[in-house]
Amino acid sequence: ISTPTYINKYRHLFSLLKKMSLTMRPKLFTPSYCCILAANFLLFFGFWMLVPLLPFYLKENYGVGESAIGMILACYTLSALTVRPFSGYLLDSFARKPLYLLAYGLFTTLFLGYIVGGSLFFFVLIRVLHGFAFGTVTVGGNTVVVDIMPSARRGEGLGYYGCLLYTSPSPRDISGSR
């Protein structure tokens, strides 16, 4: 059975349209997009570098038991979960990029608190504040990256952005500093 000639004409037209759409795609890897990819990688790299060390740090420096270690480390997660809806509201109400940069700066600065902290209370306080900053910066990063990328390539762009969450612990694992 041969195909009618009008179907072959449409096939040719669709192949031309497909070639045109591939050449006319908006650019995804802009300098802004690459910066937020790097920021997301470094954010989660810092997070994953700290996670396996904290239980040992708490046990050795403060003599904390295992159940208390779990509760102290859970403060981070609870504070990050608690702040997310509020940070989403703030990011929708005010300029996103400055709030994201403020939360990112606070997140990186609070790493110093783990070193400076002298008491267990101060450590828990830093942990809670660090969770608030982490919750805000992750919501802010997600909204800023969507604003930066072209809407026609949003699925692809979010795919690359999300991959960095899982590739960020790789340098730590390769170096054996686990």
Image (cartoon, helix red, strand yellow):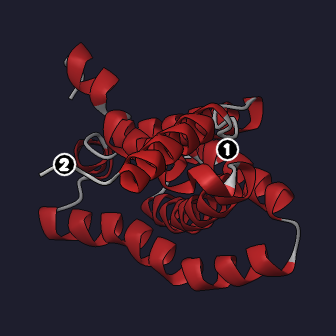
Q: Which residue is mark 2?
A: 2
Considering depth in this image, is 143 or 157 the residue closer to the camera? 157
Q: Secondary structure at mark 1?
A: helix
Q: Amino acid at mark 1?
A: Thr
How packed mark 2 is, by other alpha carbons closer than 10 Å (few <14, some 14-19, many 20 or more), is few
Question: Can the viewer see residue 169 in this picture?
Answer: yes
Q: Secondary structure at mark 2?
A: loop
Considering depth in this image, is 120 or 44 the residue closer to the camera? 44
The image quarter containing residue 39 is top right
The image quarter containing residue 173 is top left
Q: CA distance from mark 1 to mark 2?
A: 70 Å
- Nearest to N terminus: mark 1 or mark 2: 2
Q: Is residue 61 left or right of residue 66?
A: right
Q: Is residue 60 left or right of residue 94?
A: left
Q: Is residue 170 left or right of residue 83?
A: left
Q: Residue at x 63, y 43 (%)?
A: 108
Q: Residue at x 68, y 37 (%)?
A: 24
> In which quadrant will I find the C terminus?
top left
Q: Amino acid at mark 2?
A: Ser
**Residue 109 rendering spot, x and y as whole percentages:** 67, 44
Task: Find residue 109 and name its label.
Answer: 1
**Residue 137 rendering spot, x and y as whole percentages:** 62, 59
Which of pointers 1 and 2 indicates the residue nearer the eye?
2
Q: Residue furthest top?
A: 175
Considering depth in this image, is 103 or 61 the residue closer to the camera? 103
How packed mark 1 is, by other alpha carbons closer than 10 Å (few <14, some 14-19, many 20 or more), is few
Considering depth in this image, is 136 or 6 the residue closer to the camera? 6
- Using the image, determine if residue 4 lies above or below residue 94: above
**Residue 121 rendering spot, x and y as whole percentages:** 48, 66
